[in-house]
Image (cartoon, rainbow, N blue to C red):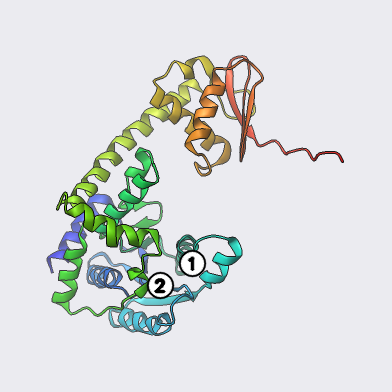
Amino acid sequence: MNLVEDVADYARQHGLWQPDSAIVIACSGGPDSMVLLDVLSRLAPLYRLRLVACYVHHGIRPAADAEVDFVRQEALRRRCGFTWQYVDVPTLARREKMSEEAVGRRERYRILRTMKRACGATTIAVAHHGDDQAETVLLHLLRGSGLQGLCGMEPRRGDIIRPLLGFTKAELAAYAKAQGIPSCHDETNDSTRYHRNRIRLELLPSLMRYNPAITADLNRLADTVRADEAFLNDCTEHVYRELACPGYGVPALDRRRLLSQPLSLQRRLIRRLWKSATGSLQDLPFHYVETIRALAAKETGKQFQCGKACAYTTRTALCMGPAVPRQKRKR
């Protein structure tokens, strides 16, 4: 039962919930999510939590039909609410020319948030743990991510909370065994057709031969980088306000002062400028940042059409406006 107390301490440390709140629990029926359901149900009376388990049927595995009933029974046995929804991920993936992995993740969070609103909940609890964190850091590293990717997952991000992130899969398995918690097995987790599975099944075991503590070390790396990233983001925000040029009708920065900043800060300021113009940091690859940075040093009137936005220079400013529609060629 120490895990229950440890999760309570972890939740208090990271402010994962408040008394009298409602939480939707993403519950697939797998061992990790079943431990999450059990632990939160034991903590519910202490914090007066209202819990609703949510199962998302991705339309990939026939076994999921039976798992819906399994999760329902386990949730009701713990006096938790239950809801579920079906989504045809394979069809969506073919239609949108995306991987089932990517579409499944998107649809899962879309449905969870729909259920959160329907239940009047404030947060969604997912069962990511320390081993998942190590996989995530490696996944981002292999993609050439910057510091933000090496931060991995956060204990809380927006409406998503991860009460088990500070614990290893072995710790969760030991708790499940001690408490006799049943679970389902998702055979897709054994398939190496999925990139994340290959990292878990092949890369991490290989790395453990070089460093048996690789999982703990990757988690420590994520914690360290996350603190550094938060500090750098605060610095960026402070300098961004100092360099901002009002009166252009679009987000703009003083060119001369931008180029006088250290290289790392220049890149961060450009990313911040992009976010002001587009509302997010999506669709901003590294080569866009470098092209925009080079543009800032060029003469007045130069521009770079970069997907969602258009960067251009005035005599004193680097501006980021809406994308300019392409003109159709005359036949």
* Amino acid type, mark 2: Cys
The tag on residue 31 is none
Residue 266's place in the image compared with 150, above or below, is above
The earlier-in-sequence mark between 1 and 2 is 2
Residue 211 position, x and y percent, is: 16, 49
Circle 1: element type? helix
Which residue is depicted at the point 25% across and 58% down?
131
Residue 178 position, x and y percent, is: 13, 75
| Residue at the right extreme of this rendering | 331
Which residue is under mark 1? 111
Residue 46's place in the image compared with 85, above or below, is above
Image quarter (top left, top right, bottom left or bottom right) of the C terminus: top right
Answer few, some or many: residues within 10 Å of disc 2's Cα (few below 14, many 20 plus, some between 14 and 19): many
The tag on residue 54 is 2
* Amino acid type, mark 1: Ile
Residue 35 position, x and y percent, is: 25, 70
Tell me if I can see residue 307 in this picture: yes
Residue 105's place in the image compared with 258, above or below, is below
> Quick one: 27 or 14, which is closer to the camera?
27
Answer few, some or many: residues within 10 Å of disc 1's Cα (few below 14, many 20 plus, some between 14 and 19): some
* Circle count: 2
Q: Quadrant of residue 292?
A: top right
Which residue is depicted at the point 31% across and 73% down?
30
Which residue is depicted at the point 49% across and 76% down?
59
Tell me if I can see residue 130 in this picture: no
Q: Are marks 1 and 2 in contact (CB under 8 Å)?
A: yes
Image quarter (top left, top right, bottom left or bottom right) of the N terminus: bottom left
Circle 2: element type? strand
The Cα atoms of the two marked residues, 1 and 2, are separated by 9 Å
> Quick one: 102 or 32, which is closer to the camera?
102
